[in-house]
Each structure stands twice: as structure tokens, then as C-alpha cells.
Image: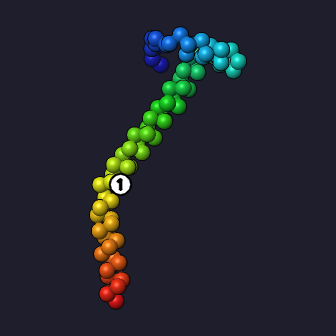
């Protein structure tokens, strides 16, 4: 396990301490869970951006192929 020193805004610290006293959870556990959640969120955002980018790359080709298939259907 790694040790990390953080500088936290006073307002965030005060709110966190209030929450921790109500949920009976250690500050360390709370921060670990928050970071784990935020990491999952960021991975999803990165994946979404990548999928949108890749989708945009093939969009024109996909539309061209669809038009080609439509012409084939009408020839028969």
C-alpha cells in the first residue's frame, strides 16, 4: 500500500469529515473508495470518447456500403 499526502480544500474536508462521522467509515477507506469510483468513471469516459472517434472514422464508409447494398437490391 502506498502513502499519499493530499492537500484538500477546507470546504471539501469539512464536508467529508461530517459524512464520515455519520457513515462510520475511516477517512482512508472513504478516499480509497472515492478514487476507485472516479477511476472507473474516467475509464468509461475514455472508452466513450474512443468509441465515438472510431465510429466517426467508419461512418462515411458505412453509409457508402449501405447505398451500394440498396443499389444491388434494386437491380434484381
Q: SS at mark 1? A: helix
Q: Residue furthest bottom?
A: 76
> Is the residue 74 above or below the residue 5 in the image?
below
How many dots with numbers?
A: 1
Residue 61: x and y, percent? 28, 64
**Colour convention of the picture:** rainbow
User: Residue 69 appears in which quarter of the rendering?
Assistant: bottom left
Task: Name the side, left or right, on which 39 lies relative to 16.
Answer: left
Q: Nearer the viewer, residue 29 or 68?
A: 68
User: Residue 74 appears in which quarter of the rendering?
Assistant: bottom left
Residue at 65%, 14% (x, y): give it: 18
Residue 5: x and y, percent? 45, 11
Task: Name the side, left or right, on which 9 lies relative to 54.
Answer: right
Residue at 49%, 30% (x, y): give it: 38
Q: Quadrant of the C terminus?
A: bottom left
Q: Which residue is mark 1?
A: 55
> Is the residue 55 above or below the residue 10 in the image?
below
Residue at 69%, 21% (x, y): give it: 23
Task: Name the side, left or right, on which 27 lies relative to 69.
Answer: right
> Is the residue 31 above or below the residue 52 in the image?
above
Residue at 53%, 23% (x, y): give it: 32
Task: Name the side, left or right, on which 30 lies relative to 23.
Answer: left
Q: Nearer the viewer, residue 64 or 4?
A: 64
Amino acid at each position: 500500500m502506498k502513502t499519499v499526502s493530499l492537500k484538500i480544500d477546507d470546504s471539501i474536508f469539512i464536508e467529508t469529515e461530517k459524512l464520515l462521522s455519520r457513515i462510520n467509515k475511516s477517512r482512508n477507506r472513504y478516499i480509497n473508495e472515492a478514487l476507485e469510483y472516479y477511476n472507473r468513471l474516467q475509464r468509461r469516459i475514455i472508452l466513450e470518447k474512443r468509441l465515438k472517434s472510431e465510429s466517426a472514422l467508419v461512418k462515411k464508409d458505412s453509409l457508402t456500403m449501405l447505398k451500394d447494398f440498396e443499389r444491388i437490391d434494386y437491380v434484381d
